[in-house]
């Protein structure tokens, strides 16, 4: 009798964790970055859909941890560890961070949200000593990503570019 595989969905500014045989997916990654932190031996993975680089940009007292790179990575690590992941065995894959619109003043840092999200996520992963084993970032197209904690494969569907696996 085969197990039913569920697809656990992660919304924008959201995070979740999954154990095999289930898979985890997020859609609508434009300038947002999808961060997957996983322990392959334990077949557990967490995914966050990061919208902005820094929680200092928050406009309210309560901060949605999944929304910002500086809070999402730490919170995601906790979720993966709680689900059975082991600290020294965690690895990461990231995707997204596209430049969705072109502006005449490309030099304006405020408009480089995609690139800033990628930089912020990478910095946080480095801070927690989690190696990035694969990435598909930048460009100008939106992505949908799906991660399988059993195989460690991140499937990336990019608008007008088909599917690739990393």
Image (cartoon, helix red, strand yellow):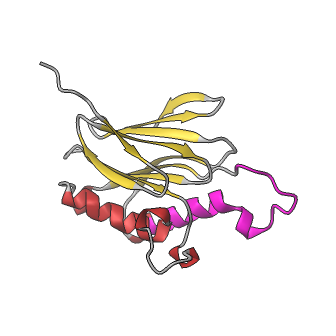
Q: Which residue is drawn at 73% across and 69% down?
A: 109
Q: Above or below — where is 4 with respect to 50?
A: above
Q: Residue at x 63, y 33 (%)?
A: 159
Q: Residue at x 20, y 54 (%)?
A: 83
Q: Is residue 88 visible?
A: no
Point out the residue furthest to the right here: 104
Is residue 114 a member of the stretch shown in magenta?
yes
Q: Point out the image quarter for the N terminus.
A: top left
Part of the protein shown in magenta: 100-124
Predominant SS of the magenta segment: helix
Q: Above or below — where is 92 with respect to 158?
A: below
- Along the line of sight, the residue nearer the viewer: 42 or 89: 42
The answer to which image quadrant residue 124 occupies is bottom left
Residue 142's spot in the image, x, y percent?
A: 62, 42
Left or right, 118 with respect to 107, comes to left
Is residue 58 a member of the stretch shown in magenta?
no
């Amino acid at each position: 009798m085969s197990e039913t595989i569920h697809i656990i969905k992660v919304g924008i500014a959201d995070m979740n964790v999954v154990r095999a045989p289930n898979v985890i997916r997020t859609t609508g990654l434009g300038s947002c970055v999808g961060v997957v932190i996983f322990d392959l031996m334990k077949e557990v993975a967490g995914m966050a859909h990061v919208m902005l680089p820094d929680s200092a940009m928050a406009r309210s007292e309560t901060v949605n941890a999944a929304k910002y790179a500086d809070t999402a990575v730490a919170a995601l690590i906790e979720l993966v560890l709680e689900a059975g992941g082991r600290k020294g065995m965690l690895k990461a894959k990231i995707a997204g961070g596209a430049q969705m619109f072109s502006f005449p003043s490309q030099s304006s840092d405020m408009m480089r949200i995609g690139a800033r999200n990628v930089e912020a996520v990478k910095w946080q992963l480095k801070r927690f000593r989690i190696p990035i084993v694969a990435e598909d970032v930048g460009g100008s197209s939106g992505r949908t990503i799906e991660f399988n904690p059993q195989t460690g494969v991140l499937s990336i569907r990019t608008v007008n570019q088909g599917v690739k696996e990393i």
